[in-house]
Image: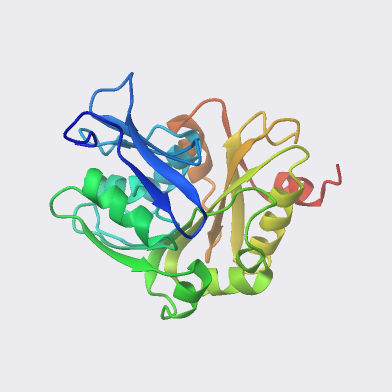
């Protein structure tokens, strides 16, 4: 779907950030495509199998979305940072009838993605072109079962999306029994990721960290997923999420999370 008629790779210049976005076919997976911005891979989409999620951190987020409500039950999801709408496609595949909203700052990016990688038939996903914080502050309290924040680029993340006031707005829109999921990319010693975990802990009832087991020591770069809930984290979820992969994975909670948040490295 993504190739232009002449077989060339589709591209678009993103005016807001001055970078070139392009969509390439995945050479190893038929029917899959990769969105890159400024030469860096950002999203992976499998049009033939939207239930297949390639990136590890996104797979961990998807696992939580699978477990926090009964299987197949439609949910309301707010995506802050849309990318190629990989997760919106996943939710539609796993929970048909879900009501979703995707917020993206770059209008050209969403138009580009939807032209070359259209959403599956039946997907109910509203597109909002706006700043993530501005869009969030307009949402009614408890209006979403899950909120996914996926805009961070390590310590260079927009400051207004990293303070405690933002996290209060984030957790405010989560319905009872819902989840807030935050992807945080960082480099050793994970100073930024630890700070974001502390800020989510200050606003959520309970918080856990999902990550590759090798990341928690703060010795390797990568992505961690923060999960905030407005209820006590069910202990039975942790082994289920570890078993679901990717491997080796870990769920950090309780005293171990205290140590992760307070570590000075």
Q: Which residue is drawn at 28% across and 38% down?
A: 51
Residue 15 drawn at (x, y percent): 45, 58
**Horizontally, is 135 left or right of 122 in the view?**
right
Residue 222 drawn at (x, y percent): 62, 36
List the single residue furthest toward the right.
264
Total numbered badges shown on the rendered structure: 0
Residue 23 drawn at (x, y percent): 34, 37
* Nearer to the camera, 91 or 63: 91
Q: Which residue is drawn at 14% across and 54% down?
A: 122
Q: Quadrant of residue 106?
A: bottom left
Q: Compared to 251, does 139 lie above or below?
A: below
Q: Residue at x 59, y 40 (%)?
A: 223
**Horizontally, is 61 left or right of 89 in the view?**
right
Q: Quadrant of residue 210?
A: top right
List the single residue furthest toward the front.
6
Q: Is residue 83 visible?
A: no
Q: Is residue 115 visible?
A: yes
Residue 102 drawn at (x, y percent): 36, 61
List the single residue furthest toward the top.
28
Q: Which residue is drawn at 75% across and 31% down?
A: 219
Q: In which quarter of the image is residue 169?
A: bottom right
**Horizontally, is 198 left or right of 132 in the view?**
right
* Nearer to the camera, 51 or 179: 51
- Indicate the colouring scheme: rainbow
- Quadrant where the image shows the C terminus: top right
List the single residue furthest toward the left.
121
Q: Compared to 27, does 222 lie above or below?
A: below
- Quadrant where the image shows the N terminus: top left
């Amino acid at each position: 779907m993504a190739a232009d008629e002449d077989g060339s790779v589709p591209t678009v210049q993103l005016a807001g950030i001055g970078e070139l976005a392009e969509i390439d076919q995945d050479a190893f997976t038929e029917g899959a495509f990769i969105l890159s911005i400024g030469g860096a891979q950002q999203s992976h989409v499998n049009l033939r199998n939207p239930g297949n999620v390639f990136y590890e951190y996104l797979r961990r987020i998807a696992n939580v979305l699978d477990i926090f409500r009964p299987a197949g039950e439609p949910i309301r999801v707010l995506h802050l940072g849309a990318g190629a709408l990989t997760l919106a496609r996943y939710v539609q595949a796993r929970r048909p009838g879900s009501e979703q909203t995707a917020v993206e700052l770059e209008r050209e990016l969403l138009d580009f993605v939807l032209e070359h990688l259209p959403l599956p038939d039946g997907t109910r996903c509203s597109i909002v072109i706006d700043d993530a914080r501005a869009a969030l502050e307009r949402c009614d309290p408890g209006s979403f079962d899950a909120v996914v924040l996926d805009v961070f680029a390590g310590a260079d993340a927009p400051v207004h999306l990293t303070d405690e006031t933002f996290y209060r707005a984030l957790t405010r829109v989560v319905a009872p029994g819902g989840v807030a999921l935050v992807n945080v990319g960082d480099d050793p010693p994970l100073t930024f990721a630890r700070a974001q975990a502390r800020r989510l802990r200050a606003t959520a009832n309970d918080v856990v960290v999902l990550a590759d087991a090798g990341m928690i020591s703060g010795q390797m770069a990568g992505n961690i997923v923060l999960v905030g809930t407005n209820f006590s984290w069910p202990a039975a979820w942790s082994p289920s999420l570890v078993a679901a992969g990717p491997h080796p994975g870990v769920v950090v909670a309780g005293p171990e999370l205290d140590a992760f948040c307070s570590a000075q490295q």
